[in-house]
Amino acid sequence: MSLNIQAIKVIYKYEMLRSWKTLFQSLASPVISTALYFVVFGSAIGSRIDSIEGVSYGLFIVPGLTMLSLLTQSISNASFGIFFPKFTGSIYEVLSAPVSFFEIMVGYVGAAASKSFILGIVILITASFFVELRIAHPIWMVSFLILTCVSFSLFGFIIGLWATNFEKLQVIPLLVITPLVFLGGSFYSVSMLPPFWQTVTLFNPVLYLVSGFRWSFFEVSDVNVGLSLAMVVVFLLCCLAVVSWMFKTGYRLKE
Amino acid sequence: MNSIISIKNLSKVYNGGFEALKSINLDIEEGEIIALLGPNGAGKTTLISTICGIVSPTGGSVSVNGYDIIKNFRESRQLIGLVPQELTLGAFETVWNTIQFSRGLFGKKRDDAYLEQLLKDLSLWDKKDNELRMLSGGMKRRVLIAKALSHQPKIIFLDEPTAGVDVELRKDMWNIVRKLRESGVTIILTTHYIEEAEEIADRIGVISGGELLLVEDKQVLMQKLGKKQLVLEIKETIDSIPESLKLYDLSLDKNTNKLTYTYDTGGDSTGITRLLQKIQGEGLQLKELQTTQSSLEDIFVTLVHEKKEDEA
Ligand SMILES: Nc1ncnc2c1ncn2[C@@H]1O[C@H](COP(=O)(O)OP(=O)(O)OP(=O)(O)O)[C@@H](O)[C@H]1O
Ligand SMILES: [Mg+2]
């Protein structure tokens, strides 16, 4: 099978270019909100919370905060990237070009994931101004970062294909992702919860993500890091399965 | 001539169950301009969208230069440029970037010189750094054409290129189309404007209710279906059509004293000489004489009407 590499490149390039113009908004708002979280949770409240497993509270929340931005931004970037041309109708051009669905996906998801990755790095740099950041396993850290960016951009791409209006575009990130992140041990260790809620939390996929990511920094985790990795990969595979079904049927792209 | 697009028994039923195309068969010759004429909702856009890969066909097949549009979609789409009916453009990218994007999608290497010439030909060069949302409707239409031509296609589909376009720009558009044809591009366009089809097309297809009612060489079509009328203004006042003239397809307008004779141009003899002799025989004198030919518009209205009556 031949690949239209050129097409993937232009989709990627112009998606990146699109955000370049709004670079300030795309980076400033997550950076500012992260900084605010640090001021409120890290310094104001954090000073009254004991360190968790030897990690100060301010430091402890860094991976969770990064994940929070990463997940929401991956989803919104990728969903908007494919939704907008659908909305304006300019998608006709991609559909009538000699481009396969796979190539369309690689272009859009690749761009969204790249943007989130850059954002993740920027947030970590911001965080390093507030706390003394240390990274125990940089390679694991970067791997988790990349895996998260890719899987949630893919998830966002699915939402963008599925959404038929702006409300639908926002409903999943708002109603599903944000609560999952907040309740997934981003700002606390699951061991601080009563046993019943600990069990409930185990059903939250974000827990595995945050826990694994945190482990790569501090070697402190709620669940085994191997399990974390496995869960992220499973999520990625699920998204891939959904996308390939969508592509086979031309779901919401073709009549 | 070779047929470059071959459509066989193509049908499309939309998800809601609506049958938008009913077994269309059509061969399009290389290098021709074919106009698809039809009322709103006839299925013109559906037909074009199906050939271009935006709508999946329900049945039948289409091949472009021998390549099946589904099995060999890369090869077939490579040959095609599409100008959609709606002004479906992004908002924030510049003219220059959007045509670069279009070219890239088709896997073509950058060619700034070609794209520059293209924009100049379409009088868009001075707008190249403008954002799309800041362009007027007519300019957007031209940007869509530029996008469609950015990868140097051999076939171009123009879905109502002159809808909502002023007279000036419409003339421009026709010139663009003629120039394209001179360069060997095959052109398929849809339109509501009969004059447009009459003006630029080589062949005309009439679509209504998802069926291709007829495809014919423009000249042949106009001859075959064209009725001519001979209007005879009589000096004397007459109250009714004289007995000896009742054989002819005549109508009388008492107010203006005009007799109108309708005849087919296709027939061997038109009967005009005999009619004139008979009028003389009645002792009537002619004041004025005039012939008019029914336009494509009349042909079109007749066809679509017949179709509707058949269905009723
Ligand atoms: N996505 C769709 N789902 C269901 N029905 C559709 C869809 N798109 C078009 N149709 C129907 O198919 C028929 C043909 O539509 P089409 O757009 O092909 O007509 P057209 O000849 O291009 O009309 P116009 O001259 O108004 O552009 C119409 O009755 C329309 O309502
Ligand atoms: Mg149409």
Image: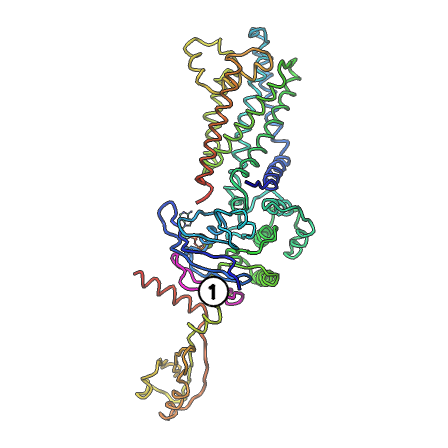
**Magenta segment:** B196-216
Classify B158 as above or below A172. below
- Considering the image in quadrants, where does the C terminus of chain A appear? top left
Please check the rendered image and state whether residue B266 is part of the magenta-colored stretch, yes or no. no
Q: Is residue B151 left or right of residue B51?
A: right
Which chain is home to disc 1?
B
Amino acid carrying mark 1 in the image? Ile
Q: Quadrant of residue A46?
A: top right
Q: Position of residue A157 (x, y in %)?
A: 51, 33
- Considering the image in quadrants, where does the N terminus of chain A appear? top right
Q: Which of these two is toward me, B245 or B133? A: B245
Please check the rendered image and state whether residue B211 is part of the magenta-colored stretch, yes or no. yes
| Colouring used for the render | rainbow
Q: Which residue is mark 1?
A: B204
Classify B33 as above or below A241. below
Q: Quadrant of residue A168?
A: top left
Residue sitting at 39 percent across and 55 percent down? B23
Label 1 neighbour load within 10 Å: few <14, some 14-19, many 20+: many
Q: Which of these two is toward me, B257 or B192? A: B192
Q: Secondary structure at mark 1?
A: strand
Q: Is residue B285 left or right of residue B167?
A: left
Q: Position of residue B168 (x, y in %)?
A: 59, 62
Q: Position of residue A238 (x, y in %)?
A: 46, 28
